[in-house]
Image: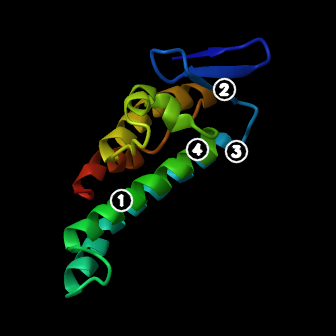
Amino acid sequence: MSKESKSGLYKIELNNMGDYIEISTADTGLFDRFVETYRQIVSAAKELPRRYREIEKVRVIPGHENKTVEKIRANVRFCGESAEKIDLVFGQGTLKKYFREHYEKIPDFMPGTEYFIDFFEQMVPVLEKLFGRKIDERDKKAVKSMTQYIR
């Protein structure tokens, strides 16, 4: 999934269509930015049930058809913000490359929770190997449990 170029940059293949990102292990902050983003996304996922409860407490949501629509919007907001955070770590369009097949068929595709989990499960071992550092096992378990927070 990754190979070093002559310039010292590593190409990480993101799909079977040849799309990749390039990173450098000389970027001393990259691993920490990735771990921090990883934690922020898990934390935001844990906040969604609280947001859903807040929505349920409101009798009428002005301008919205019903509470289900508002919950869906909260989830879409979470997914959009998570995608932006990943792009800040690896570069603009990282998830569009990773999920290229989906974007080609559905241009407005928004990855759901299970897709973020898939992305992290693929990227964590690659980054751990390249940087010679491990991500805390608790953080890995937290990512896997994200689906319980998103409905």
> Which residue carries the number 1 mark?
45
Amino acid of disc 3:
Gly
> Which residue carries the number 4 mark?
87
Q: Earlier in the sequence, mark 2 or mark 3?
A: 2
Task: Count neighbours of disc 3 (C-alpha within 10 A) and say few if under 14, some if 14 to 19, many if 20 or more.
Answer: few
Answer yes or no: is residue 31 visible. Answer: no
Q: CA distance from mark 2 to mark 1?
A: 28 Å
Answer yes or no: is residue 89 visible. Answer: yes
Instruction: Name the spot of residue 121 as percent of width and height, x first.
Output: 39, 34
> Which residue carries the number 3 mark?
29
> Which residue carries the number 2 mark?
22
Q: Nearer the viewer, mark 2 or mark 4?
A: 4
Viewer-side residue, 68 vs 135: 68
Instruction: Name the spot of residue 66 as percent of width and height, x first.
Output: 20, 74
Q: Is residue 76 left or right of residue 20?
A: left
Q: CA distance from mark 3 to mark 4?
A: 15 Å
The residue that appears at 67% across and 15% down in the rendered structure is 4
Q: Earlier in the sequence, mark 2 or mark 4?
A: 2
Task: Count neighbours of disc 4 (C-alpha within 10 A) and say few if under 14, some if 14 to 19, many if 20 or more.
Answer: some
Q: CA distance from mark 2 to mark 4?
A: 13 Å
Q: Earlier in the sequence, mark 2 or mark 1?
A: 2
